[in-house]
Amino acid sequence: MLLGLDDGTPVFAADLSAADEPAALRLGAAETSGDLRTVAADLPHPQAATLAYARGLLHWNRHTRYCGLCGSPARSAQAGHVRVCTGPECGRLSFPRIEPAVIALIERPGAQPRCLLARHHGAGPDNFSLLAGFAEIGESLEGTVRREAAEEAGVTVGPVTYQGSQGWPFPSGLMIGFVGQALDDRIDVDGAELLEARWFTRGEVIERIVDGPGAGPADSIGGWLLRSWAGLDPTVDDRRCPGGADAAVVGGRANHFHSHRPHRTHDLCDAGRSADADSRFRDRLHQRRHRRCTRHEPDRRNRPAGAGRIGGGPFVDGR
């Protein structure tokens, strides 16, 4: 599968999931293997984004072997970016699908701001996180935030403001981050999805991040939302920051999520991405759009895709 060009050099991905580990290591000329989710935060941003891009496309190809319309086998086309039904009377084209989900930081009204954190079934006794859920058919993303808060925590949410998004190819998600304003402080957990939910002050959140269980990985949009709301650098794992909370606070630019344009963070995280990487990402987006606009032309259907350059896709991109 062709991912694109990196400074003129083709970059490919191969699916070795059917091979055992020794065979996969031999074929990949590698010494060891690892799960991308566990190592992505330690990789350079463009490399992490490219590997995530490859993982998502490989997973989609592996799980789209048959036509969803007639059931005939589907073959790979356009260098792995399209699946074509081989049925004699069908020929349906399938493209990678994204599963949108929201993740929301819900604020409680009042003189002292508080945010809602919840403990889900299966979570540890002090493992609280933000509310999240998939968008349903015919539902707006803002409506998803309000529905999830009402269904799971019994919290009524009014205004909802977009904050940023994060591609999450594990296997094909797109996480869209919001801040919602609760209309009151009542909580009534459903007992099905959630075990408990509580309001936390900024001081309590900072204490949890620095000295407690943390806010989640620094490359996740959930951690980004929570750290920013607390006034901490959203790109830093504050439990490893010398000097603790004081050293982690971003002087003069703490995000309290009342702005429509919060600070951008990394690219699996996006902060620190160079202008050159941005231009490479735009090149790749342009190539994808061009390919889709011409996908019905018979003479272009098998044209290799991804002729743009490989660059870091916006894993967390707050606009």
Image (tube, rainbow, N blue to C red):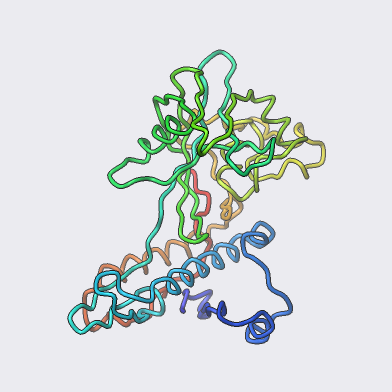
Up-down: is 296 above or below 205? below
Label count reads: 0
The residue under the point 64% across, 25% down is: 202
Residue 26: percent from the left, percent from the top? Answer: 67, 86
Viewer-nearest residue: 57 or 24: 24
Up-down: is 182 above or below 93? above
In the picture provided, is 31 more to the left or to the right than 309?
right
Residue 259: percent from the left, percent from the top? Answer: 48, 31
Image-quadrant location for residue 95: bottom left
The residue under the point 67% across, 30% down is: 205
Residue 303: percent from the left, percent from the top? Answer: 33, 81
Residue furthest out toward the left: 89
In the picture provided, is 245 more to the left or to the right than 75?
right
In the picture provided, is 81 more to the left or to the right than 253?
left
Residue 12: percent from the left, percent from the top? Answer: 51, 79
The residue under the point 47% across, 17% down is: 184
Q: Is residue 319 visible?
A: no
Viewer-nearest residue: 166 or 32: 32
Up-down: is 60 above or below 229? below
Image-quadrant location for residue 146: top left
Q: Is residue 110 visible?
A: yes
Viewer-nearest residue: 315 or 276: 315
Residue furthest out toward the front: 191
Residue furthest out toward the right: 243
Up-down: is 159 above or below 102? above
